[in-house]
Amino acid sequence: MAAAVAPWRPEIVLPVLRGGTYPGILLAHLLQVDVYPVRLSRRENDIVVHETPRWLIEPPAAVAGRRALVVDEMCSTG
């Protein structure tokens, strides 16, 4: 996966906490870039209550204007 995204030259990795943590940190290490964990969800207490995801932990201001690779464990409606 790191070889596949390397030509895109991400400057930072934003792993979505929970499922994206391990692969995101590993990719950041392999790509030698900074990592800024984020968290967003449609769920509260594991029940879907929001139509669209809500930020629980937002990216910091240092992320603005930088090429970011967002890493999560799967693509779904969650």
Image: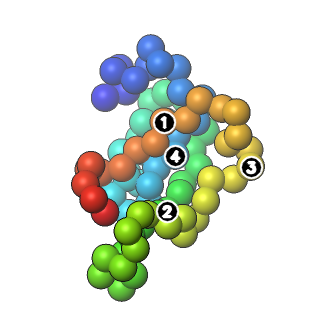
Image spot of residue 53 (x, y percent): 43, 63
Q: Quadrant of the C terminus?
A: bottom left
Q: Is label 3 in contact with label 2 (beta carbons under 8 Å)?
A: no
Task: Point out which mark residue 14 bears.
Answer: 4
Residue 13 point in image, percent of width and height = 52, 40
Judged left or right of residue 53, residue 56 is: right
> Where the N terminus falls, by quadrant?
top left
Answer with mark 4 or mark 1, whichever residue precedes in sequence: 4
Residue sitting at x 66%, y 32%: 66
Sort mark 2 into few (<14), some (14-19) or many (20+) by Cα contacts within 10 Å: some
Q: Is residue 62 left or right of residue 17?
A: right
Query: What kind of residue is marked 3?
Result: Ala
Q: Which residue is mark 1?
A: 69
Q: CA distance from mark 2 to mark 4?
A: 9 Å
Residue drawn at (59%, 29%) of the image: 67
Q: Amino acid at mark 4?
A: Leu
Counting other residues with Cα less than 10 Å from the Cα at mark 3, is it few (<14), some (14-19), or many (20 or more)?
Answer: few
**Residue 19 versus residue 8 in the image, above or below:** below
* Horizontal and vertical percent position of residue 58: 61, 59
Question: Element type at marker 2?
Answer: strand
Disc 4 packing (10 Å; few <14; some 14–19; many ≥20): many
In the rendering, at what x and y percent does residue 75 appear?
27, 49
Residue located beneath label 2 in the image: 39
The residue shown at (36%, 85%) is: 45
Q: Return the residue nearer the eye: 35 or 43.
A: 43
Name the residue tied to disc 3.
61
- Marks 2 and 1 sit apart, C-alpha to C-alpha, by 14 Å
Contact? badges 4 and 1 (CB < 8 Å) = yes
Cα distance between the residues tagged 1 and 3: 16 Å
Q: Earlier in the sequence, mark 2 or mark 4?
A: 4
